[in-house]
Structure formats: C-alpha cells, structure tokens
Amino acid sequence: MDSMPDRTEVEAEPSLSTRAAVLHGARRCLGVPALGIGLSMMGFGAVAHDLGFTAPQTIATTALVWGLPGQLAYMELATAGAPVLVVMAAVAFANMRMLPMVVTGLPLILGGRRLGFLARVALVQFVAVTVWTQMNNDAPALPRRARLPFYLGFVTVLYTAGLSGTVIGYSGGTLLPDPALRVAVFMTPLYLLLLVSAARHPTNKLAVALGAALGLGLYPVIGDVAVLAAGLAGGTVACAAGGLLDRRRGQGEPGDG
C-alpha cells in the first residue's frame, strides 16, 4: 500500500492558483513561526520601552530594520549617542548575515519570474532566517509560479506577527517577568531547530551540527564573529559532503538493477 504524501505535496498541485498559494503560505506561517517572531519582538518592544524610546520609534525600527540583532544594535548605539553613520554601519553589519540568504533565496522565491530591481529589493526586505528556512523546506515541492505567492502569504503573516509583538511588548512588556521575556527570545531558534530536524536531506542536519560545534569552539577566540565564521565553514563543508554523497549515489544506481 502506498504511503500517504505529506501535506506540503498535497497542497502543491500543478493547478495551485495564486490565491491558494498565498493562503497556503499564510497557513504555514500560523503557529510556531508567527509565535516565535511575535514573542521575540515582544521582548524587543519591552527593551525599547525600558530604554525610553517612543512607540513610533520602536515600531519603525522593527518595520524598517526587520532583524533582531540589527534592531538591538540600533537601540544600544542610539541610546549611547553614537553618530548616525556609526549607527548605520553597525546595523548594516549586524544584518550582513542575511546577505547569503538573500542571494540564494531570491531565485527560489521568484520561481523564474522576471521582476525589476526595485521590486526585488522590496521583496527581499522581508527575508528573515525563518523565511529562508521555510522557503527551502517548502518551495521545492511547489509549482514554480506558486512560490512567489506562497512567499507573500508567509511573510505577510510573519511581518504582522512581528509588528504586533513589538506593540504588545512595548505596551505591556513591563508587566511580564524577566524569565518570560528570556524564554521568548529562544522561540525562533527552537522553531528553526525543529524545522531542520524534520529535513529530508542529511546535508541540512550536518550543516547545523558542524556550525554549532565550530561556533562553540570559535566563540572564546574570536567572539561574535564566530557565528558568521562557523555558519560559513559548517555550511560549506556540509554542502561539499552532500554533493559528494549525491554523486556516489548517482554512480551506484546503474549497477543496482
């Protein structure tokens, strides 16, 4: 008896309409992805309130920077009275980790569509680690023309959750105990680990394992740069190992039968 297809494959029929793809993306974001981002931004909103930032400033920071490390860097440096150029450089470097995800994720999102430069810039503004991971997990099973609508549905819910969490955290974050805010920060990493644990290709799991091991070893030596270095090294080694494994499997197939 044939095994039942997973729900992503069921949703990804060739006849998937634009509206259905948008709704599918929105549904995939509801739950842990939206909750993780919402809780993380709730913690950010509470921090911004404690630092004396206004509500419009706090919401605008989430909306425009859209990356917790960059948002926190902006808040800390702005509070310290750093020059504008220094603040801009710090935010840019904090969000530099997104550049590889944008470069590799944009072709996957577009699915062969041709868009102008400004349209592409607008699209990648919403890319986050959560979005990139989910797209790599779901997009290969989707029709190419359905990937952009799926992405738009997913990021609309995620962006709304992030902004809502910021507002809630700013308005009532001081009512929450510190342990609750600390737990909220770990919701997104926990979601990403769960998503990777369900990955079908061992390369994804190997990349995470190598990155974590290298990060723990490098952090005492090079500090925060260890996150970037470990991710780059671990991902490169895992991709090389995965490619070698795939080639060996391909070479072994003709003799199987």
Image (cartoon, rainbow, N blue to C red):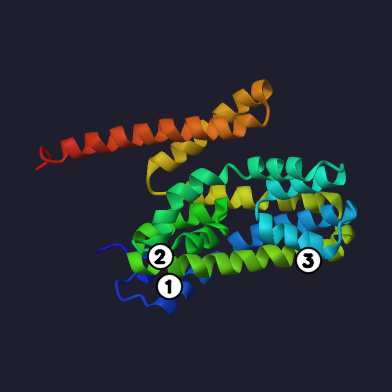
Neighbourhood count class around disc 3 (C-alpha, 10 Å): few under 14, some 14–19, many 20 upward: many
Q: Residue at x 43, y 73 (%)?
A: 21
Q: Earlier in the sequence, mark 2 or mark 1?
A: 1
Residue 35's quadrant in the figure? bottom right
Residue 3 image position (x, y, % from top left): 30, 62
Residue 147 marker: 2
> Disc 3 on helix, strand or loop?
helix
Q: Residue at x 34, y 36 (%)?
A: 242
Q: Is residue 7 visible?
A: no
**Whether residue 217 is situated above or below residue 38 in the rendered picture:** above
Residue identified by numbered label 1: 21
Residue 175 image position (x, y, % from top left): 89, 61
* 73 left or right, relative to 14: right
Residue 167 marker: 3
Report if the CB atoms under discs 2 and 1 are less than 8 Å apart: yes
| Residue 74 vs residue 83, the one in the foreground | 83
Q: Earlier in the sequence, mark 3 or mark 1?
A: 1
Q: Is residue 227 visible?
A: yes
Residue 145 image position (x, y, % from top left): 35, 68
Real-space CA distance between mark 2 and mark 1, rounded to the nearest whole angstrom = 7 Å
